[in-house]
Amino acid sequence: MIEVRHLTKKYGKNTAVDDISFTVEPGKIHGFLGPNGAGKSTTMNIITGCLAPTEGEVLIDGHSVLDEPIEAKRAIGYLPEVPPLYGDMTPEEYLRFVAEAKGVRRDRIAEEVADVMDSTGITEMRRRLIRSLSKGYKQRVGIAQAMIGDPDIIILDEPTEGLDPQQRAEIRELITTLGRERTVILSSHVLSEVQELCENIIVISHGKIVADDTVENISRSLMQDITMTLTVMATADEVRQVLSGIEGIKSFDIVSTTGSETSAKIRYGSELDLRETVTFAFSDIRRAVVSMGIEELSLEDIFLKLTSADDKNDGESDTDEGDADAENDEEYDDEDENVTYDPKDYIGGAVAAADDDGEDEDKDEDDGGTGTPFGGK
Amino acid sequence: MTGYVTMAIILAFVGFFVTNMNVRIGSPKFEYSLITAVSFFVFLIIVPFITMRSIAEERHSKTEQLLLSLPISTHRIVLAKYLAMLTFVAIPMLIIGIYPLLLSLFAGTEGVVNLALAYNGWFMLFLLLAVMVAVGMFASSLVENQIIAALIAAAIFFLMFFMSYITSAFPTGALPSLIALVVCAVVLGAVVLALTKNSTAACIVTGGLAVILIVLYYVDASMFWNLFPSMLSSLAIFDVFMNGASYIGVFDIGEIVYYITFAAVFVFLTVESVERRRYS
């Protein structure tokens, strides 16, 4: 179990991590999510003892990382943002070295290295130089290194960053396997990945935790309104008339009218399900519903809501945050003016990378088309 | 690869001096060949190449994070690196150690090789290299770029090499020493400020030392006579080897203690320098 208590890390006047506390229960895969520069890597470096906090403490199974580093570190395997590999060693030599350094018993080393190479799928590469391996294999060697010594907790800092979709899928599979027997904490700014892999997520923004819960709970708590997109073969007036008559609708807009079709956006509380009501209301006046869609709040939207809310609260006291922040503010300004706003631009590289997966491409277009996820606010 | 090349260069240069002086000219003084190798800067240039990567490269390639997250204390990591480099220097030194035995098979123009003197010089050279490796490792722990690490190490070595010239140029009076030491106190304060970012601590260090120095000066100014130059000359590690016991041919415990202490101080400073990164 990891207990993080009131952790603060300052670099000069810059506060990278600002009084964060959380507990990671054993088992499961935990996600650590936040935009670049939010303090994810700093927090992970502190948990693993690579950095000392300015204030606060981290307990690993009851051992303070600062006061009893040897005991605490023994329970952790860590893959930093850049895999710490020696290019002029082969994976086998490297893993032997790590095993010796972690104090694996000499007669167990060969067996353990072979096991770890087997489960990370690098056995056939074991005699090549690490330098000449592909990025995906290097990442595997990095994960193998974290697994050596059979630690209970494995911490992975952006393990799929910079990999191609095929490699990404393979690493995810590996992480899922790891999560069956150990506690895995993984950081990412690739939202779909966290959504897919993790049961719990901690969202961090500007060095503060803005959410710490299961994916479902976070979604539920933030899902206040449901937006329904509707296309009906009717005139705008008819649509207006029908929709005003339905109870539970908070607001609606006529988006467009093309020929005999009218499109509308309807907003209503998440406790209701108005799909049937709306369909029957239009069939009552013999008008056909051509299409109907419910926009579900994706983790990306949650993420944006959380981080932007944080931004607005802190807006005025933002004195010690750097350029990244200024950029964000700019983006939010755009959004306030209701200029078509693509959340993808904001998370930039993150989602560009997520697009590689191809899974959520449709949804992406959708988001782009409908404009602001915060539209009504 | 760098390793084998540097070993080869050490062997080639020492071999050249031994061939020239002991074989061709026929001098039985093996230790003088080693002194000549040092005085021609062979080790001053080679040692930085051995030490430059030791810590700077770990930082540059981010493998430092592996070392820091391992369940091993920093001083063990640094000591292991130091001993590894020492082993590395010991290999060519062991090969060189065979030379006196080979030379002793033949009589030179001025008699046979005195093995005791030869191995005294050889042992002192090894200790000198141990000090240089410690200093080079410390230089490597200061920066991320290995070339800069090598340049810093080489600069320190050359400064130490020419220390006697530098100190002889310094006035021997009491007041110049006082001024120099107060300047040192200010520099020390700046270092404290850079390390701890605590201006109060820096002021206390600088102010305290300056006050103590000035009070001592007024109590007994003669204490300060030639004090600074003699302090500087204690950094002249090369003079100890070249003009000291190995040259005269005496086995001097004081020099051995001096070298070991010097090396230990720099290994300790390296540990602190690596550890400091956690707190940066």
Image: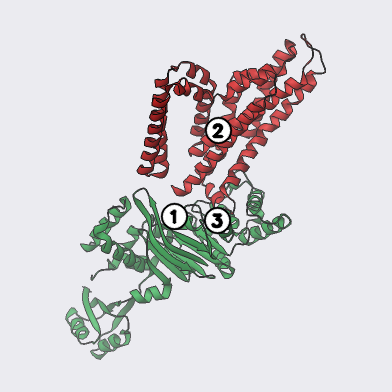
Chain colours: A green, B red
Q: Residue lying furthest left in this view?
A: A237
Pick whichever of labels 1 and 3 is earlier in the sequence. 1
Question: Regarding mark 1 in the picture, which secondary structure is present there?
Answer: loop
x and y, in percent, of residue B40 in the image: 60, 18
Q: Vertically, is B76 above or below B85?
A: below
Cα distance, mark 1 to mark 3? Answer: 13 Å
Question: What amino acid is at disc 3?
Answer: Pro
Provide residue B236's location: percent of width, then percent of height. 55, 23
Q: Residues within 10 Å of mark 3 (few under 14, many from 20)?
A: many
Read off the residue under disc 3: A69
Secondary element at tag 3:
helix
Residue most toward the right?
B105
Which residue is at a point 56% across and 36% down the rendered structure image? B265
Query: Which residue is labeled 1 in the image?
Result: A53
Q: Residues within 10 Å of mark 2 (few under 14, many from 20)?
A: many
User: Which of the two residues, B79 or A141, is positioned nearer the viewer here?
Assistant: B79
Residue A169 shown left or right of residue A39 in the figure: right
Mark 2 residue element: helix
Q: Are marks 2 and 3 on the same chain?
A: no
Name the residue: 63% across, 54% down.
Answer: A102
Nearer to the camera, A225 or B165: B165
The answer to which image quadrant residue A40 occupies is: bottom left
What residue sits 45% from the left and 17% below the top?
B172
**Which disc number belongs to residue B135?**
2
